[in-house]
Image (cartoon, rainbow, N blue to C red):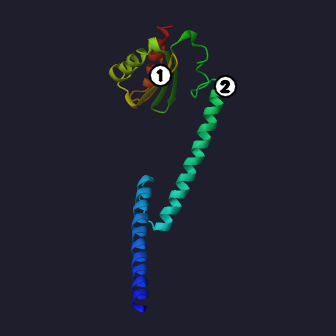
Amino acid sequence: MDQSLSNTSQSRSVDRKTIEKNRRIQMKALSSELNALLPQTSRAPLTLPDQLDEAANYIKKLQVNMEKMTERKRKLAATGSSSMSSSVDVSVPKRLPKIEIQETGSILHIFLVTSVEHKFIFYEIISVLSDESGAEITHAGSSTVDDTVFHTLHCKVEDCDYGASSRISESLKKLVNNFN
């Protein structure tokens, strides 16, 4: 009978070791997956507890950002306004399209609000920027809400041509005003 207890004891010990080994393998795999989701840093590799702390901090930061965005969305829905600059009035789409251009050094930030039937103006503006004025477009995007299309463009103007930003701004405003 002692031998059967001994075999049972050894069997349990082997089972526990196998279970523990499988648990460790699974935890390492999960940790690797979690680490792959985090933004990569150029620092030296972190220890596992440090990686977990970094992951927890990153998740907390994402939660805070999500809460801020949810609150912002709620406020925008309550006021019915847009996240664009307050000088572009989108609440009354009587005289669409509208354009706002902001200059930051050699960078132009262009915000265009059009109706769905006038969204082709966006392509004409891109044509003016790239073909005629030689500006380099670094970002272009748009989104549609009901019958209104919101376009954003960011472009870099060559520094060698003094006053090019002002000339581009004026020609774009003239182009858009011709549609009003």
- Is residue 45 in view from this perspective? no
Which residue is found at the position 43% from the left and 92% from the top?
2
Judge whether 43 appears above or below 153 on screen.
below
Image quadrant for the N terminus? bottom left
Which residue is nearer to you in this view: 17 or 100?
A: 17
Question: Of residues 162 and 91, which is closer to you in this image?
Answer: 91
Q: Nearer the viewer, residue 24 or 118?
A: 24
Question: Which residue does the image show at 63% across and 27% down from the upper left?
Answer: 77
Q: How far across and down, in percent of the image, does residue 112 sit? A: 49, 20
Q: Which element is circle 1 on?
A: helix
Q: Count up the numbered dots.
A: 2
| Mark 1 vs 2, N-terminal side | 2
Left or right, 87 with respect to 37, comes to: right
Q: Does residue 60 sit above or below 3 in this rendering? A: above
Q: CA distance from mark 1 to mark 2?
A: 34 Å
Q: Which mark is residue 166?
A: 1
**Type of residue at label 2?**
Thr
Residue 33, horizontal then vertical, whole percent: 41, 57
